[in-house]
Image (tube, helix red, strand yellow):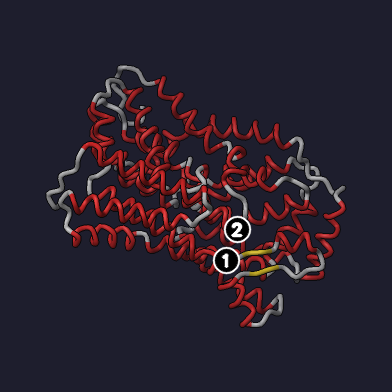
Amino acid sequence: MDNIQIRKKDTTFVLLITAILIGSCIFFSVTLFWGFLASILITSLLLVRRGLKPSSLKNMILQGVMECRNLYLLILLIGATVSIWLSSGVVPTMIYYGLEYMEGMNFLLAAFIITSLMAIFMGTAVGTISTIGLALLGIGKGFGVPEHVLLGAVISGAFIADKISPISGLLNLTLSVTKTKYRDVFKRMTATLVPVYLITTAIYYYLGKGYIASGNSGSLGEYQTAILKGFFVSPWLLILPIAIVALPIRGMKTISTISIGLLGGIIASISLQKMSVIAVLDAVFFGYKGTTASSQLNRILISGGVISMLEVVLIVAGAICLSSILEESGLIKPFIRKSIANIKSQKELVMKTGVISSLLTVVTCDQTVGILLPGRVFKEKYEEMKLSPTILARTISDTGTIIAPLMPWNVNALIIGMISGVSAVNYGPYAVLCYICPVVSFLSCYSYKKRSLTGDD
């Protein structure tokens, strides 16, 4: 590593300027890519002045970008899959049967429970939202459920994937950095997840009483008739989403699973919906728009395809580049080390872990830094204070990981916005699990007293 002379105020300056630039982009409705690009340039100039060689800086950026190349592919695949699941009739079929069989249900509560179960098997929050979540949003519109309220419930269920799914990339990153095993962390997580889930369920039950799925809406019959006239509808089409849920249980990776979903949708579009190959490719790359007899339904059956995700890829790449520079240069480590230097109790240690993990997720707009840095820096302190590393893993998961979709500038919120057309400002108040989880995690700190706690005791 180069001999970098980082000053005390450098970290504060970088974090502050990053927040200002990102906030300015949001205020002026400019793509966040420019905010990240400007932050990267300013941070790079600062580090070069402090002694970092340009070649080392380039390696930091390239390493960060290359490590997350699968994420870019996943984002593009999601954009293509959403369009194809519309054109193939998969989502219209799910909407059709949903309208038929979900009458009389507390739809908000049902959406949360269904999404949370599916998320565990899919292993990715964004993937769950872009498939099962998209179908639930379509069905909910038919029942008159406000889209932002329903999306909040879907997000609450979906982000259980990033928190506890054994095939979640973020959870496995957390396990790796804290040197823990899934079985041990799962047992530890139940102490906060069970009360969080019960509280969230109770809230959606209460809110959902005002949104009982009812067939009295005149648009429901119009929706079903339009779907039947515009698409080939069959229960056989439901095999595709079932397979997408089942394959991760067999251990298949997310990209492979989404790819199979995309391929299956393409085959269904051509063979069952009688689309031409050119029309299918157009939907994949440039998006799909419903052409049924119902204008209301057509507003649901719309997606931007791969092209709509290019901006998201650029933003994610910018966030990852900035995160890589902050981490590899050591620029942000003094901020963390200073925070833990004077910790005197287990309660304070757990509390600060959650605060710093959350703050890093907020500032860097990506969960990765909020997992990596606290996991690496706090691990020794946990050993020193005789706290199990499973508590470190759980705290990071309860805070920095779970709050990601609540910030409009976070990459998760950006992708969700692209998929649904609803901003974090609107759905945030209803994504209750994402802010109840950190609250319960912080309250759990009061159970730690001045005593030894190791293993799974």
Q: Which mark is residue 131?
A: 2
Residue 14 or residue 107, whichever sits in front? 14
Q: Earlier in the sequence, mark 2 or mark 1?
A: 1
Q: Quadrant of residue 204?
A: top right
Most extreme residue toward the left, as rendered? 3
Mark 1 surroundings within 10 Å by alpha-carbon count, few (fewer than 14), some (14 through 19), many (20 or more): many
Circles 2, 1 touching at the beta carbon (< 8 Å)? yes
Q: Of helix, strand and loop, which one carries label 1?
A: helix
Q: Of helix, strand and loop, which one carries label 2?
A: helix
Name the side, left or right, on which 184 lies relative to 6: right
Mark 2 surroundings within 10 Å by alpha-carbon count, few (fewer than 14), some (14 through 19), many (20 or more): many
- Amino acid at the residue labelled 2: Thr
Q: Looking at the picture, does residue 18 appear above or below residue 301?
A: above
Residue ID at (55%, 58%): 246
Residue ID at (39%, 54%): 36
Name the side, left or right, on which 440 lies relative to 209: left
The image shows residue 60 at horizontal and vertical percentages of 25, 57
Q: Is residue 186 visible?
A: no
Residue ID at (45%, 58%): 251
- Amino acid at the residue labelled 1: Thr
Name the side, left or right, on which 180 lies relative to 432: left
Which corner quadrant holds the C terminus? top left
Question: Which residue is denoted by mark 1 in the rendering?
Answer: 81
Residue ID at (46%, 43%): 163
